[in-house]
Structure formats: C-alpha cells, structure tokens
Amino acid sequence: MNDTQLYAMPIEELAARTLVAGRALSDDLPVNLLAADACQHRQIRGLLNNTADDDPAGPRARPAVDRLVDILGAERETETLGYVHVFEGENDPEHGATGAVYRHRILTERGEAIEAWSNKLLYLARMMRILDARLCGERMINRRFAG
C-alpha cells in the first residue's frame, strides 16, 4: 500500500491497520534469529512491547520502531559479505549502454532475514507517521472550528 492510499483511507481504518500491524510484528518477529546476543534479545523484546500496546501513534511506539530499525540496520552491516555492481538498462546499438549501475549488497541468509524484517518495520514506521500526522491535523481543525 502506498502513501497516497494511506492518506486517503478513513482514519479509523488506518488506526486499526496500524494497531494490527504493530501487534503482528510483536508476535511474529523472530527475535532469536535477529538478535546478536542475549542483551540485544532483551532490548528488542522490550521495544516490541511498546509496538504491541493500544496506541500506535503514542509517544513510545514510534521511537521504539525507529530504534528497532537502527538495531537491525547495524546487524545487517555485520551480515554483509560484499557488494556487486549491477547494470540496469539496455545496450543501444547507436549510443552504447544506456541505463544505470547500482551497487547491490550481498547478504548472508541471516542478513536476508534482517533485510526483510527491516522493510516491514520501515513500512510500520511510515504508517505510524502518517497516522500521527492525520491525528494532529484532525486536532488542529477541531480546535480551529471549536471556538
């Protein structure tokens, strides 16, 4: 689901989807696979408790998700085997190669899992930010017309 759809859906639906996504993340995240050690395992579990509560736009949920993204990003760096340059484009007979060269990260199996869960966390963080912005906008409008 893209940002335009998240902004267009009813705010109640966005809140419900964000709440369900936070709870699902808390239930499904394979902490044993993603955590580097017991200390990090405990830290991740504590942060997940903040994403599973009943306020996905609350003061603890968004920072917890952002911190989880940071932790997994650092772990992904340790699971990087190297990089390869990948060309995306076409070979034009008249002008030569037209396209772009991208640097692609080569990850271990654990690194691939970390990457996948990081993407899910980033999507949840985006949903939380949009929900928070929409709630703030609604409060602003209500204050404006209340008095």
Image (tube, helix red, strand yellow):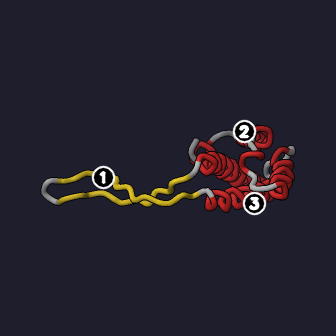
Please tell me in which quadrant of the rendered image residue 24 appears: top right
Please tell me in which quadrant of the rendered image residue 8 appears: top right
3D distance between C-alphas at marks 3 and 2: 21 Å
Q: Residue at x 47, y 60 (%)?
A: 83
Q: Residue at x 61, y 51 (%)?
A: 111
**Badge 2 density bin: few <14, some 14–19, many ≥20, Cα 10 Å:** some
Given residues 17 and 146, the one toward you in this image is 17
On the rendered structure, is 22 left or right of 46? left
| Mark toward the viewer: 3 or 2 | 3
Local secondary structure at mark 1 = strand
Q: Is residue 23 above or below residue 122?
A: above
Q: Is residue 100 above or below residue 3?
A: below
Q: Residue at x 66, y 47 (%)?
A: 117
User: Which residue is disc 1 drawn over?
Assistant: 89
Q: Is residue 107 above or below residue 8?
A: below
Given residues 41 and 126, the one toward you in this image is 41
Work out whether mark 3 precedes mark 2 in sequence or the reverse, and give the earlier one.
Answer: 2
The numbered disc on residue 67 is 3
| Mark toward the viewer: 2 or 1 | 1
On the rendered structure, is 143 left or right of 89? right
**Badge 1 density bin: few <14, some 14–19, many ≥20, Cα 10 Å:** few
Quarter of the picture containing the N terminus is: top right
Q: Amino acid at mark 1?
A: Gly
Work out whether mark 2 precedes mark 1 in sequence or the reverse, and give the earlier one.
Answer: 2
Q: Residue at x 68, y 49 (%)?
A: 121
Quarter of the picture containing the C terminus is: bottom right
Q: Amino acid at mark 2?
A: Arg
Local secondary structure at mark 2 = helix
Residue 64's spot in the image, x, y percent? 79, 56
| Residue 146 can be seen, yes or no | no
User: Which residue is disc 2 drawn over?
Assistant: 17
Q: Give yes or no for contact between labels 2 and 1 (Cβ–Cβ under 8 Å).
A: no
